[in-house]
Image (tube, coloured by chain):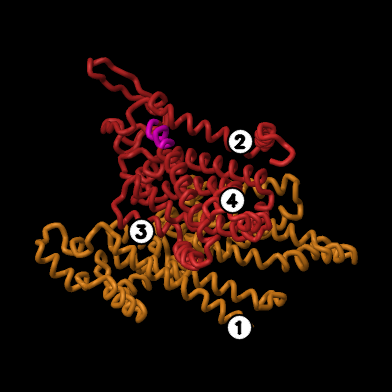
Chain colours: A orange, B red
Amino acid sequence: MFRYISKRVFATVPVMAIVVVLVFLMLRLSAADPAAIIAGDNATTEEIQDIRVKLGLDQPVLVQFGVWLTKVSTGNLGESFFFKKQVSELILDRLEPTLSLALCTIILSVMIAVPLGVLAAYYTGTWIDRLVMGLAVLGFSIPVFVVGYLLMYVFSIELSWLPVQGYQRLSEGFWGWLQKLLLPCFALSAVYCALIARITRTSVQEVLGEDYIRTAHAKGLTNKIVLMRHALRNAAVPIVTVIGIGIALLIGGVVVTESVFSIPGLGRLTVDAVLARDFPTVQALVLLFSLTSVMVNLLIDLSYTLFDPRIRY
Amino acid sequence: MNAFTESSGRVTLWRTLLRSPSVMIGAAILLCVLFIGLAAPFLHTMSPDKINPSVRNKLPGYESTLRDDEGNKIQFVHLMGTDSLGRDIYSRVVFGARVSLLIGATVAVMSAFIGLILGLLAGYFRWLDAIVMRVMDGLMAIPAILLALSMVALLNAGLSTVILAIVITEIPRVVRLVRSVVLSVREEPYVEAAISVGTPTPVLLVRHILPNTIAPLIVQTTYIAAHAILVEAVLSFLGVGISPETPTWGNIMAEGRAMFVMLPHNIFFPGLFLAVTVLAVNLFGDGLRDLLDPRMRKRL
């Protein structure tokens, strides 16, 4: 098992290295000159040149890469052009809303989608199955911002049950936090639910065809126990995997949802930084999100060895 | 095509396609959207760019009068209302179909083509495999919307930049798919036989290996088209996509954000068209997948 873990950990090293190089290159390929953006519209050529030297932009690309990498690895993500603050400070400041949104969405999606997927698998071919799978296709097709505005219209504007937009920190009260988070989470969970419900259905369907399920039925266990104790437990691996695969999807959704609901999180920060052409912030955020998605997938792979004792490497 | 002659094989395929409800429904909706896009110059009631300050922010069904060049009064009905610049939402939505379909089709074809070539080469040549796949893994690790968002920001925004940005995010998925097919096919006896009779590698790749990738590739291409339409709408919605004057569904919604509480139709009409179009492409893809490659059903 130790060999598997070390092998899997080492396998992510080249992926992370490629991500780091790609994120660095992205800035170099840009048509815009960062120095000119910092200097503003009225700057003279000399002023721009001064800034270029100060930022090290006059150095060869490889040297720039070395300098940037050393800084990033010590946690120094540079200073934001637009917000005039350390990027790491900005990120820490915006972390809580994004984490709340992402975690609540995952919990909500699993709570909704796994039972639906199990139901669809159990009643394969009936109207229940068709309804769940139809909803799943719908979930894949409706853009998250349309779902967001639809929910906002019904529950905030027409019914006035929930606040329209915004975010409240958890430290300022649990109920306020939950109230403001509820709609964004439901909006964001649509795609995620579709993904999880589909994979739950196929994996439970596969397991239901196994011999030991027939045995379990034969020894007189109730459907409920067979489904919960025998089928679902063995279908867990693909379900957990898809949660990892969906992380990239979730991050994309976070960016949009935070814009719709005016949540001051990392996704909103990304859009603001992109619109302001604030390159150090964009670079840091893309790097952070990508490494998070790689790490989550690594942790999920490693967790198999814990909860599925059949997997031996 | 074993027992069938070529033409009867084609007839069978058509019959199978006709029998699949999701393919038929998907295709029917797509044809409608395509018709709307192509016939936009005849369907629209007013130029989609025409700014009219006197009819800003009107509800659907509002009637306005305009004077033409000769001074005649013309009555207009704003079927879907107007936006904050007084532009007719209905006319903009109709023209928006063009951009969405164009983006979906172009991105799907381009990423399928580039991905097919890279996947064939990576699957067949071991030394290339390691390099190509590591780069693809890296690209896939960056969330698609984030990658497209930052690329559009860095290279100046515009239709071609948006297409390029989405193509780059989609290529890795195609490469992975094609490579996996090539890897499983290259060990088949008939490929070995072809090598042993001295088939040149390019012929081997194109004639013996490539046909195996076509069915899964077509299915994947439809999903890419659906995803591309969504990503373009997201980029426009966030204000970094195609320039705001261009009528795209994402742009109309972006414009409607500020007035959403008063005038939700600015978001709902284009949103409805967007969702129905993407739904149709997805249905079409699901139907094709079940017909062309039943094994893929399990792979999701």
Specify the amino acid type for callout 3: Ser
Mark nearer the viewer, 3 or 1: 1
SS class of the residue under badge 3? helix
**Kind of residue indicated by mark 2:** Ile
Front position among marks 2 and 1: 1
Give, as a three-letter code, the residue at label 4.
Thr
Q: Chain of mark 1?
A: A
| B176 shown above or below A52 | above
Q: Are marks 3 and 2 in contact (CB under 8 Å)?
A: no
Q: Which residue in the protein does label 1 denote?
A: A3
- At mark 2, the secondary structure is helix
On-image quarter of the C terminus of chain B: bottom right
Q: Horizontal and vertical percent for residue B257?
A: 37, 46
Asked if residue B22 lies left or right of residue A186, the reply is right
The residue tagged 2 is: B25
Q: Which residues are magenta?
A: B91-98
- The span from disc 2 to disc 4 (Cα, nearest Å) is 26 Å
Q: Residue at x 47, y 60 (%)?
A: A180
Q: Give the alpha-carbon distance from disc 3 to disc 1, as whole Å.
A: 38 Å
Question: Which of labels 3 and 4 is toward the front?
Answer: 4
What is the C-alpha distance between the residues marked 3 and 2?
Answer: 36 Å
Mark closer to the chain start, 3 or 4 = 3
Q: Residue B150, labelled with which disc? A: 3
Is B129 or B245 nearer to us in this picture?
B129
The residue at 32%/58% (across/down) is A274
Near-viewer residue (B22 or A200): B22
- Label 4: element kind: helix
Q: CA distance from mark 1 to mark 4?
A: 35 Å
